[in-house]
Image: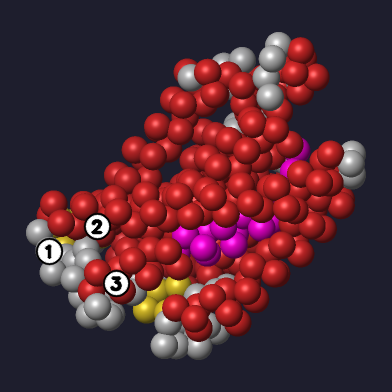
Amino acid sequence: MFQDLQSQFLGSTIGGLVAGSIYALIALGYTMVYGVLRLINFAHSEIFMIGTMTSLFILIAIAGGTAPITVGVFGMIGILLLIAVASALTSGGSAIVLEQLAYRPLRKKGATRLAALISAIGASLFLQELFGLAIIPALSDKAGKVQQNAPRFVPHEELFRIGNGVVRTDHVFVVIAAVVVMVVLDQLVSRTRIGRGIRATAQDPEAAVLMGVSIDRIVRITFLLGGAMAGVAAALYVMEYENTDYRVGFLLGIKAFTAAVLGGIGNLRGALLGGIVLGLVENWSSIFLGSEWKDVTAFVVLVLVLMLRPTGILGESLQRARA
């Protein structure tokens, strides 16, 4: 076992950082919506799925199929920017539609959080089946309920080694892109007028209204930003793993929710920390337990956090972040 740890630790750490970066981006959507509305948006996983489908179909359109796309470094960056922006727009737009159809009517009627939670679960199942039965078959020659493969446009080539760990081109793209996007979002929420509106609404909605803040507008922006983060995560996921399907958001959504809770749900930097920690823990656990236990580890982490430290590692909510 010690030999396995010695030979696989660095490789697992690199894989954990890559997976954790994607978890963290998705977790930002959960944590932003919870910070403003105190709502667990379980349909956020399908917002991520919509982003992966957008990236998939753009890549297939560029490649004319599933054959690899051969371009230079600037071409790779250009394609990644294209699918990231397109996925962010479709996921962000879908999140706004979701809020208007599934949550806003309940909010206007003063419904309980349980009603909103049930609505979220219903919306999640509806979107899964909609894409599996109707949208994917209409846009693809494959049935919607089979895995859809995406063409490779970033080669999985070794750049350098850290001990026994191999750092590939795609690993660098994922981590750098995720960090840049998360820093931009953190600065937007911390330093801009929109960010002040989001924090004010999270802290005291009634006082925010008296100060001229439009709650509906802030909620829309919050869903848009959270959905956009899921869209960027979707583009990175398709680039890294080169496939998707109509249920891809289910497991990743639960892991991203676990990351949000682990870091401190409602805390943007907590989502980043939670995603990285979760990615590392589940990859390290596979050294001892086998890769088939990786997903189980994520659920065990969720249960332990809820039992031992429900406020998460940082335990600071969005409403108190630089208020």
The colour scheme used here is secondary structure
Identify which residue is drawn at 21% across, 52% down: 78
Identify which residue is drawn at 61% across, 21% down: 197
Mark 3 surroundings: few (<14), some (14-19) or many (≥20) residues within 10 A = few
Can residue 133 be seen here? The reply is: yes
| Amino acid type for the residue under numbered disc 1 | Val
Q: In the visual, does 49 lie left or right of 166?
A: right
Task: Give me the disc on residue 61.
Answer: 3
1 or 3: mark nearer the eye: 3
Classify residue 139 by image quadrant. Answer: bottom left
* Residue extent of the magenta highlight: 38-52
Q: In the visual, does 235 lie left or right of 321?
A: left
Q: Are marks 1 and 2 in contact (CB under 8 Å)?
A: yes
Question: Where is residue 72 shown, x and y percent of the image?
Answer: 10, 59
> Which structural element holds mark 3?
helix
Task: Give me the disc on residue 71.
Answer: 1
| Amino acid type for the residue under numbered disc 2 | Ile
Q: How many marks?
A: 3
Towards the viewer: 136 or 255: 136
Identify which residue is drawn at 48% across, 46% down: 229
Residue at numbered disc 2: 79
Task: Please say if 268 is above or below 141.
Answer: above
Question: What's the distance in space between the residues labelled 1 and 2, CA to CA?
Answer: 9 Å
